[in-house]
Every structure is written in C-alpha cells, then in structure tokens.
Image (cartoon, rainbow, N blue to C red):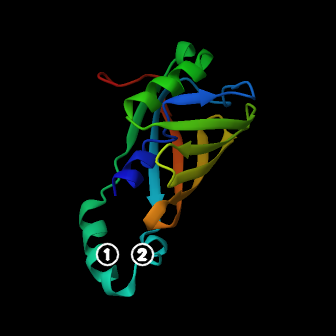
Amino acid sequence: MKKITVFLLIIIANQVNADVEIVPLDMELGYWEMTTEVDIEEMLANIPKEQREMMRGMLTSKMKLPIVKQCITQDTLNDMQAQMKKSFKSAGNDCDLQVTKSTPQEFKGVLTCADGETKATISTKSIHSKRHESQINAEMGSMGQNNIKTVGEWKSATCPDGI
C-alpha cells in the first residue's frame, strides 16, 4: 500500500538521470490540481483468491486518493529538473528515473527502485496547456502490475494561499 501511495505523488525518485534534457511541458502558469485513478480490481487480480475480499475491504476503506495541489511559477517551470529532484527526494525512496523523451507535448521515463521490486514506466502528455494526462504502469513486487492514471488540470492563474 505504501508503494502505491508513493506513486500517487507523481513520479517518485530521489535522483534523475537525464540522458535526455528535461523540457518543460506546455502548461499555463498558476494553480494546478492533480487527480489519480487506480484500478482496484486490476490490483486485486494479483492477490490470491483467499485474500482478495480482505484486501478489497482494506483498499476501499483506506485508499482515499488526495488531490495534489501545485502552484506552477515561471521559476519552477524553468527549473523542472531541480523541482523533480526535490519532490522525489521528499518521497524518501531510493529510486532512479531515466528520462527517455522530453518535449513540450510529452514526457516519458522509466523509474527503477533500489528495492529491486519496483519498476514503472511513466508517460505524460500535454493534451493542451491546461490539461495533462499521465499513465504509470508499475510493477510493484508482490502487488504485481498496476496501472495508475493521473490528470493535471489548470484551475486559475492565481494560486491560493498556502500552496
């Protein structure tokens, strides 16, 4: 469950290896909200039948996915790699993100964690400057293959206090 929560914080790692230069996605400056969807039934398919009902109860009662709120400024947009490193380090995982593609319309990478059990491919597309969609296909050891979708939506040019 911890591993899933970490992925929900959007692309978790403490070190970025940029063989490809990171180019900021086409996005408006200001207040953004990120929502996440996880297919619980797909996740449960990897659990032995005897444990599925118990896990279903645990996941549905505890898996309240937060809306991640961000304030994107010109400074954060200009220094996306530093921002990624900072947010990844705060997640507390020993993971490495290999960037394979980075353009204003698309970001792709492969995340590999030192635990040897966690690996994910990450693909983010800029639908337009006010909406981004990401697909994370994660292999998380005993929890098997999981697909996580996040949607980032621009809300306003002004960020609320405290974000």
Q: Residue at x 46, y 32 (%)?
A: 88
> Do the CB atoms of the residues marked 2 and 1 lie less than 8 Å apart?
yes
**What residue is disc 1 on?**
56
Label 1's element? helix
- Residue sitting at the far top: 75
- The residues bearing labels 2 and 1 have C-alpha atoms spaced at a distance of 7 Å
Give the percent coordinates (x, y) of residue 33.
44, 39
> Which quadrant is home to the N terminus?
bottom left
2 or 1: tag closer to the N-terminus: 2
Q: Which three-letter amino acid code belongs to the residue tagged 2? A: Leu
Question: How crowded is the residue under tag 2: few (<14 C-alpha within 10 Å), some, or many (20+)?
Answer: some
Viewer-proximal residue, 74 or 90? 90
The residue type indicated by label 1 comes to Arg
Q: Nearer the viewer, residue 46 or 94?
A: 94
Indicate the position of residue 35 as horizontal and vertical percent values: 45, 49
- Where, quadrant-wise, is the C terminus in this rendering? top left
Image height of 142 relative to 161, above or below: below
Q: Check disc 2 and report its element: helix, strand or loop.
A: helix
Position of 14 relative to 5 (above/below): above
Residue lying at the far bottom in this picture: please name it. Answer: 50
Asked if residue 124 lies left or right of residue 57, the reply is right
* Residue ID for mark 2: 44
Instruction: Give percent across and percent down for residue 98.
Output: 66, 37
- Residue at point 49%, 42% (across, down): 10
